[in-house]
């Protein structure tokens, strides 16, 4: 199983703790041994959950503009964004069991990348826009688009894989959000056909088409 860049920092300590407790059972007597065994099983379960969370499967890149994140579409709204102008915003909520590696929706150049510290509100709430977040402004053949990676209540860091000036191909990895989180994408209304997703749709980053570009 391939592990996402930035995930080993969590997985290795978890397995080391698990190993420590299983070795400890050799040197303790009952009833303490049963307590240690319980902690070992709990630590082992956490380690496997982290393995699932930080998995990074290969993806077959889809047509058109593709999803940035795995998860469920929570909201689709019309916006007048200061950077993109009249746009469609698609918000995707990423649960803990989703793949948390985000991908580029369309070929483009990273014009700006901005990190904001913030709170840790549940990612599916409107107020989560105050959470820690990274804002990427992209220059593409359809104009400017914007991606906002938002940390959730359990997440403590967003790990970017790109920097300002990078030329990134559609489907390439742009970052990782640790634990539950949300990703918003702003697409210019005049440059795209009606979007191909709706609220409650499940998406896979890089594979599922969310919009088609006018010829």
Image (spheres, rainbow, N blue to C red):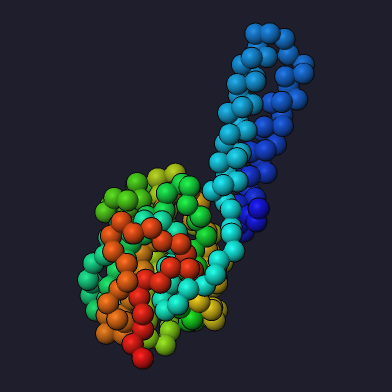
Residue located farthest toward the bottom when viewing the structure as drawn = 215
Q: Nearer the viewer, residue 36 or 45?
A: 45
| In this rendering, position of residue 144 left or right of residue 7 | left
| In this rendering, position of residue 52 left or right of residue 72 | right
Is 121 located above or below residue 206 in the figure? above
- Residue occupying the point 61% across, 39% down: 47
Position of the C terminus by quadrant: bottom left
Q: Nearer the viewer, residue 56 or 182?
A: 56
- Residue occupying the point 35% across, 75% down: 211
When asked about the image quadrant of residue 79, the answer is bottom left
- Asked if one can make out residue 130 in the rendered structure from this viewpoint, the answer is no
Is 201 located above or below residue 106 in the figure? above
Where is residue 45? Give x, y as percent: 58, 34
Q: Nearer the viewer, residue 82 or 187?
A: 187
| In this rendering, position of residue 199 left or right of residue 61 | left
Is 40 located above or below residue 104 in the figure? above
When asked about the image quadrant of residue 182, the answer is bottom left
Where is residue 15? Give x, y as percent: 67, 38
- Asked if one can make out residue 86 in the rendered structure from this viewpoint, the answer is yes
When asked about the image quadrant of residue 41, the answer is top right
Where is residue 142? Give x, y as percent: 37, 86
Is 119 located above or below residue 23 in the figure? below
| In this rendering, position of residue 101 left or right of residue 34 | left
Across the whole image, how many numbered discs are drawn on residues?
0
- Residue occupying the point 72% across, 29% down: 20
Where is residue 44? Give x, y as percent: 62, 33
- Residue occupying the point 27% across, 80% down: 189
């Amino acid at each position: 199983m391939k592990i996402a860049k930035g995930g080993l920092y969590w997985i290795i300590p978890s397995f080391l703790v698990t190993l420590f407790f299983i070795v400890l059972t050799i040197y303790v007597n009952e009833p303490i041994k049963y307590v240690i065994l319980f902690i070992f099983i709990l630590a082992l379960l956490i380690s496997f959950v982290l393995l699932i969370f930080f998995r990074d499967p290969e993806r077959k890149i889809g047509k058109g503009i593709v999803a940035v994140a795995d998860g469920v579409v929570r909201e689709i709204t019309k916006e007048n964004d200061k950077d993109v102008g009249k746009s469609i915003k698609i918000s995707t909520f990423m649960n803990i069991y989703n793949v948390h590696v985000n991908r580029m929706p369309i070929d483009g150049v990273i014009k700006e990348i901005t990190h904001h510290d913030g709170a840790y509100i549940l990612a599916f709430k409107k107020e989560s826009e105050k959470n820690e977040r990274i804002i990427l402004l992209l220059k593409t053949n359809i104009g400017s688009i914007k991606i906002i990676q938002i940390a959730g209540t359990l997440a403590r860091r967003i790990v970017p894989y790109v920097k300002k000036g990078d030329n990134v191909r559609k489907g390439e990895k742009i970052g990782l959000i640790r634990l539950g989180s949300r990703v918003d994408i702003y697409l210019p209304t005049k440059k795209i056909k009606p979007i191909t997703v709706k609220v409650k749709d499940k998406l896979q980053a890089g594979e599922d088409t969310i919009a088609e570009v006018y010829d």
